Amino acid sequence: MAINYENGAPVKLEGKYAAMIVCWLLGNGCLFSWNSMLTIEDYYVKLFPRYHPSRVLTLVYQPFALGTLAILAYNEAKINTRQRNLFGYIIFFISSLMVLILDLATSGKGGIGTFIGICAISGAFGVADAHVQGGMIGDLSFMLPVFIQSFLAGLAASGALTSALRLITKAAFDNSKDGLRKGAILFFAISAFFELLCVLLYGFVFPKLPIVKYYRSKAASEGSKTVSADLAAGGIYAQPQEVEENPKQLERLSNKELFFQNIDYALDMFLIYVLTLSIFPGFLSEDTGSHSLGAWYALVLIAMYNVWDLIGRYIPLLKCIKLESRKGLMIAILSRFLLVPAFYFTAKYGDQGWMIMLTSFLGLTNGYLTVCVLTSAPKGYKGPEQNALGNILVLFLLGGIFAGVTLDWLWLIGKGW
């Protein structure tokens, strides 16, 4: 479809709601495999009781994600976005399949060899996440903010869906022989199928939507060199003529300039996730004590976090309660650190009801603040700059996650190994 411009506004923007649905599914696929691995921690804790899998797997995942994204963000202006995102989703699919194959090949037995294999797959998930999360948020940053919101909601939904599936499979196989493993195998199979679906959605559906074609053409007219393959996939082979007539449009701020103009947003992303990951999932999986829910307790906590994280990502759709003030965001994010002593004393003295409430609040604020920051930051920039800023913010998000999972080990002080 030819894209027409009238005073900088699109003539036709069909496909907005279809694009929102696809963005939601692609966001879901970005973390579905990883959340599947996190959600079956009860299986891995039983399989590898001496290796702290809930902490180690996250700690292995993050350096690969952070290191890969740092390289990709630095070279963002030269990278083919289509190839980057497709490569990431394909790695997700292959790695999910490998988790299933490894479990079947070892007949569900533990041991250091199997654990190393699981850790290697966890690292592959990190590489895939860096390709997809940074690439998609950068790509969506020069489109409508609601697309970013849908993608981020999909990220949270992956956690809620995997938690719901885990509770269902645990209930279904709880009394059967080797029930934990049967539930895990079902998880791996569903995860691999869903990642294959995401490859097909991004490769053949998303680039053909008229509204997506329009915004990618607009980004190309502003000097973006990362969208050409996606434009071709959508049936557009020539950039708009305005580029040749006004070459000054090709000028853009450097990554360094973008970073210093948005350093508060970058710190926001880092601080949101350094707190969240210092508590979730390691502390919730291993350090909350024994309660009447027994083996279900950690699963319920993780499920509550994921559900409220998802709810929190939809709250900013209500404009009246969306926080957009830069100072207000920083104050709210710093205030969340009061949750650290709250979790400590609740784990030590409180009952499971208080812990469930705190975990729900952790998820709610995580989702809400993430969407507020990522939908507010890209405003006022050209397409290539918005893409670069999206990558920078996701880099700080992953940096916060890495710092958080490292700090999570501090909860073990005084408890022995």
Image: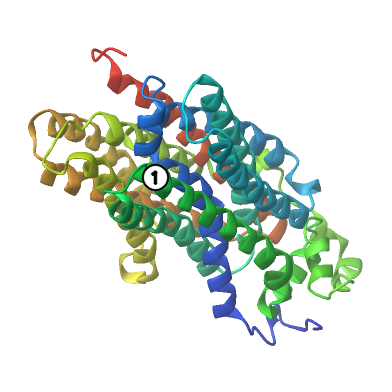
The mark tally for this picture is 1
Image-based side of 336 in relation to 241, left or right = left
Residue 208 locus on image (x, y percent): 73, 76
Residue 366 appears left or right of 349 = right
The structure residue drawn at horizontal position 71% and vertical position 81%, both measured from the top left corner, is 7
Residue 156 pos. (x, y %): 42, 55
Residue at image position (82%, 83%) is 2
Residue 136 lies in quadrant: bottom right
- Nearer-the-camera pick, 185 or 312: 185
Assign the C terminus to one quadrant of the image: top left
The quarter of the displayed image where residue 29 is located: bottom right
What type is the residue that disc 1 sits on?
Thr
Q: Position of residue 179 (x, y in %)?
A: 35, 45
Outermost residue, front side: 177
Callout 1 crowding tier (Cα within 10 Å): few <14, some 14–19, many ≥20? many
Q: Which residue is mark 1?
A: 39
Helix, strand or loop at label 1? It is helix
Residue at x-position 64% and y-position 59%:
196
The answer to whether residue 167 is seen in the rendering is: yes
